[in-house]
Image (cartoon, rainbow, N blue to C red):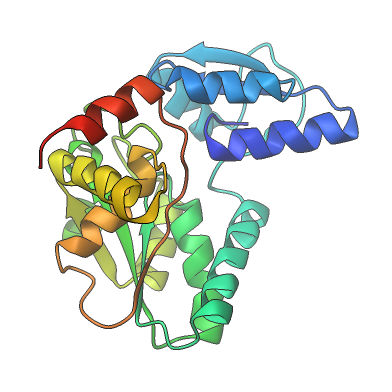
Amino acid sequence: ASAGNMAQGVAWQARALGIPCTVIAPNTAPETKIEAIRRLGAIVLQVPFDEWWTTFERRAYPGIPGTFIHAFDDVNVMAGNGTIGLEIVEDLPDVDAVVVPWGGGGLACGIAAAMRSVRPAARIYAAEVATAAPLTPSFEAGSPQTVTYQPTFVDGMGAKTVFPQMFERAKALLDGTIVAQLDEVEKAVRLLAERNRIIAEGAGACPVACALTGGAGNGKVVCVVSGGNINMDKFSTIVSKQS
């Protein structure tokens, strides 16, 4: 399994079933994520970001046997993510737009696939941070593009490129992308903490930052705050900054 919120879910289930679990994590992942995975009983192998991304392409890691669970390019993973879309419509039937963080695309495409069947009028946008935003230029060019990836505290989303199969799904399911600047994501982290008492990691706050740009339009806009795995020292630094 890949690192992140999904890795914690896989580790939890593996522990419940008594199955050994190894997580391949990028060395850019914050310690809070790594420790959360270890607490659930999984072995964590941290590798350079490029090697981590290559693991998704080859769908295996040398020397580690077992079933590889892909973090995003997996129909079952996307179906599971789709339940979020169903819950959104259940709670807010007349939702106008949904903004979802884009990492590999499994979360956004899964939610969009479900919502297209129950609330086709809703607009669905992929949220990207400017330091790692390959989907936006890919949409503009009509094919997967490669961008410069800059590691930041927004570690739970973004990459250098888009998987071709995920790009095709995104073209069919999403209405577009919205890009937030890094300082806008920091402001969104503070906003969620101050007004909603929510601790959000960078990837979780990015959809809020994107929605605040106005890119998702007016009406009832839902932001998927996808995680709260942020180092407390980094969180404290961000919330202590002056707006």
Residue 89, position as x, y percentages in the image: 53, 79
Q: Which of 158 and 95 is in front in this view?
A: 95
Q: Which of 160 and 241 is in front in this view?
A: 241
Quarter of the image for residue 190 reads top left
Q: Is residue 158 above or below residue 209?
A: above
Q: In this view, does 99 lie to the left or right of 2?
A: left
Residue for point 34% across, 46% down:
193
**Residue extending furthest toward the right:** 18
* Placement of the C terminus among the 4 image quadrants: top left
Residue 39, position as x, y percentages in the image: 68, 20
Q: Is residue 133 left or right of residue 77?
A: left
Residue for point 42% across, 15% down:
27
The answer to whether residue 203 shows anywhere in this view is yes
Q: In this view, does 214 lie to the left or right of 155?
A: left
Residue 206, position as x, y percentages in the image: 29, 49
Residue for point 29% across, 43% down:
189
